[in-house]
Image: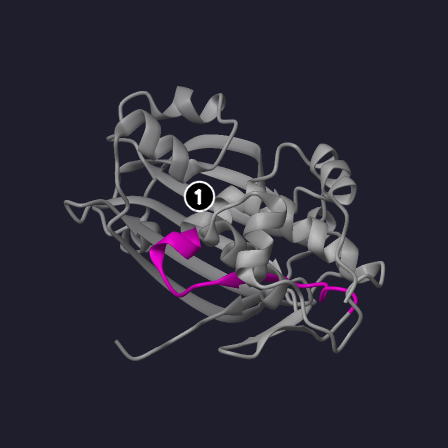
Amino acid sequence: MNSPSRMDWDSSREAAPDLPRYLQVAKDLTDKIAAGKFPVGTHLLTEMELCQFYNISRYTAREALRQLRDAGLVSRRRKSGTKVIALAPATAYSQPIGSISNLLQYGEDTKLRLRSQRRVVCNASLAKALECEIGREWLALETLRTRPEDGCPICMTTIYLNVELPGIDKRIATLSGPVSAMLRDFYGLRIARIEQSIQATLVSARYAKLLRVEARGPALRAIRKYYDESDRLIEYADATHPGDRFTYVMRLQHN
């Protein structure tokens, strides 16, 4: 196995300075695999070797390798190391859903573009979904989420935010990062519980244009409800993902 040079890492880091460190490392390793420096069937550096080479923590190395595994580039087995199984990642975005942190990380790893915001008054069906009384107001957002590295659309999402949060309209108007980070930084809210449901659906004609796919093509619809520590519904998100661009990955294990 050929070890990559320090110069290779430095140049890749300069190319993606805004990405979290584990994504920088994952991107660098992905590029090296594509370039043939780690051929299919060979093993990558161990976690400890990655820590020394990239000057990162064990946690960062583990998260970087998890990105490669979720992309279908490597397989990992205890005591057997990390083996390269493909030269190019799958086209779908992989979203692990094993914990609350996994779901919140999704917001950190992707780019959100706010298309519109408005206040809505709940009718009977919306009030049922938002677990509130008919006639109550919520702040409704339409957003487009993309991959930061190439701008490829991942999903269209309608988000409803609780207007009990003071100044939420202005906060959203100047939003530059994940909604969850804004709720944490400005309101001190901790997401204590998330409920998620996923179902098969079709892409509407309007969403198809924004997502750059054919209308009525297959899609996944994911509805997420975010609750704070007082069990108050803070955020409701209804997302449509093109079927060929998104994969949910669930890991279950015995305690």
Q: Is residue 191 left or right of residue 70?
A: left
Place residue 220 in its image quadrant. bottom right
The residue carrying mark 1 is 159
* Amino acid under disc 1: Ile
Question: Which residue is rendered at x = 47% and y = 53% of the image?
Answer: 58
Where residue 47 appears, as percent x and y from the top left, is 54, 60
- 242, 176: nearer the viewer: 176
Question: Which residue is rendered at x = 74% and y = 41% of the image?
Answer: 12
Where residue 71 appears, as percent x and y from the top left, is 64, 64
Q: Is residue 197 left or right of residue 128?
A: right
Is residue 167 shown to the viewer in this render? Answer: yes
Q: Is residue 175 above or below residue 73?
A: above
- 40, 147: nearer the viewer: 40
Position of the C terminus, as image quadrant, is bottom left
For residue 173: magenta?
Answer: no
- 113, 34: nearer the viewer: 34
Where residue 46 appears, as percent x and y from the top left, is 58, 64
Place residue 254 in its image quadrant. bottom left
For residue 98: magenta?
Answer: yes
Q: Secondary structure at mark 1?
A: strand
In magenta, the rendered stretch is 87-103
Q: Dot 1: few (<14), some (14–19), or many (≥20) neighbours within 10 Å?
A: many
